[in-house]
Amino acid sequence: MFVSDSLSVNEKGHLTIGGVDTVYLAEKYGTPLYVMDEASIRGALRDYKKSIDENYENGGMVAFASKACAFKAIYEIVKEEGCGADVVSGGELYTAIQAGFPPERLYFHGNFKTEDELAMALDYGVGRIIVDNGEELEALSAMAKARNVTANIYLRITPGVDAHTHSFIMTGQNDSKFGFTLETGEALQAAKKAAAMPNIALKGMHCHIGSQIFDEAPFAHTAELMIGFLAQVRDETGLTLTELNMGGGFGSRYVESDVVLPYGEYMRRIAGAMKEVAAKLSFPLPYIVIEPGRSIVGNAGITLYTVGSVKHIPGIRTFVIVDGGMTDNPRYALYQSKYTAVVANKANLPADQVVTIAGRCCESGDLIQEHTKLQPCQRGDIVAVMTTGAYNYSMASNYNRLPRPPIVMLSGGKSYVAVRRESLADLCCNDL
Ligand code: LLP
């Protein structure tokens, strides 16, 4: 019934996360509430690091894709674990720096970086700027020149690989707004141009084929294409690039039927494919960077809600209406994402009711999950939705002027507030 190892049921029949009673957490901090288990985040980062150590002798970096969940405490944890971070906006970059994150371990992405953001990246000295298009390359070169610095860059390559996932989160196919297309020769042209540009140091290449991908074959295929491309760049420009960033996208478990590969398996396949092609083309193995986001934080998080009402429509369906919704979790509304839920204060009872969990927003599409199994429940019960650690808080909004929930972190059996609950006053703080 539980999709994450950190979840269990205690002697009171309450759901626990990281050994802590979720009903107690709901009482102490109020609902809606995001709860994240630090041990699970650290464990995932360590597993990925180990998978590089065990499968890839040429070394590498695990860079947490912070768009999955960005707040200061997360950057602190990632920093402590010796990992890097992918940031995608001035906001994420600023938050990382505020958390004391070493800028040299930051990878700055995005298909539109403003001049202000590029200036921030150069001034902070971020490790790598991932250039997405030709105009950005020109602008960055000019800005680096004006500052008399060198920008260390990767180019984002669109490898032309279709990963099997929701079309909104597929990014490796040719029909994509991201990156330089490999198949059309645009990528090679950009590499030639970047290699010759003043104040630009082309260090390597980047690609990212999509998100919530369970199959390792598209990653292995992409790795082959990318090593082939690095060899082509060497042959055509004489420049041997020494770094390859393979992006993220490894799937997380949302429902029991999701079959998630152990993280080591992704690296084993990617490393195997890279080594095979590199040997064939006599290309020296590059340093590898991977950027998992969802799989680091997804299963570390749950959301707790209080049930407001249960509306039974005979012959149609039963709605369980909770005190949050698409404002704290827009993923069902956007992608029809699957989730598993449980009544946290009755977690030992059979989940024998088929219900639709709906939010409180003035919108019929404000649903967390349709036709899902839940224990019998009523007003005042606590509903826990699992696997909400990724792309929930980071995609939350204030629609209907609802304050965003806090994030409570668990560490060593204790809880602490990492992000405080927004107040009503916060909602007006920018209104002049
Ligand atoms: N690297 C790059 C360049 C990315 O664009 C992404 C995600 C990642 C790494 C991390 O991918 P992950 O390991 O988390 O799958 N909002 C969507 C997901 C969008 C992913 C965007 N890019 C969702 O809720 O499913």
Image (cartoon, rainbow, N blue to C red):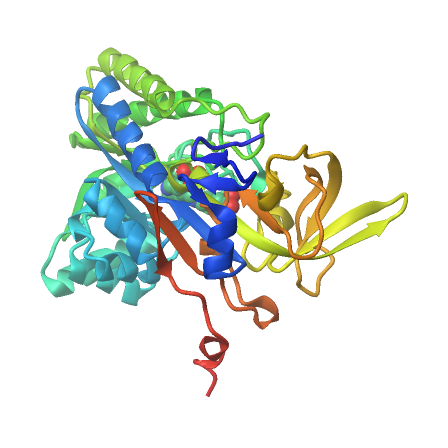
Which residue is pictured at 40% across the width and 42% down the height? 297
Q: 22 and 226: which one is in front?
A: 22
Q: Is residue 132 visible?
A: no
361 on left or right of 28: right
In the rendered view, tell whether residue 226 sits above or below residue 18.
above
Which residue of the protein is positioned furthest toward the front in this rendering?
Answer: 11
Which residue of the protein is positioned furthest toward the right in this rendering?
Answer: 315
Q: 395 and 12: which one is in front?
A: 12
- Where is ligand 1, by quadrant? top left
Provide residue 97's location: percent of width, then percent of height. 22, 59
Q: Quadrant of the N terminus?
A: top right
Provide residue 98's location: percent of width, then percent of height. 23, 62
Provide residue 231's location: percent of width, then percent of height. 24, 24
407 on left or right of 369: left
Which residue is pictured at 38% across the width and 61% down the height? 419
Q: Is residue 63 visible?
A: yes
In the rendered view, tell whether residue 173 sits above or below residue 328.
above
Which residue is pictured at 48% across the width and 81% down the height? 428
Q: 322 and 229: which one is in front?
A: 322
In the rendered view, tell whether residue 307 sits above or below residue 215.
below
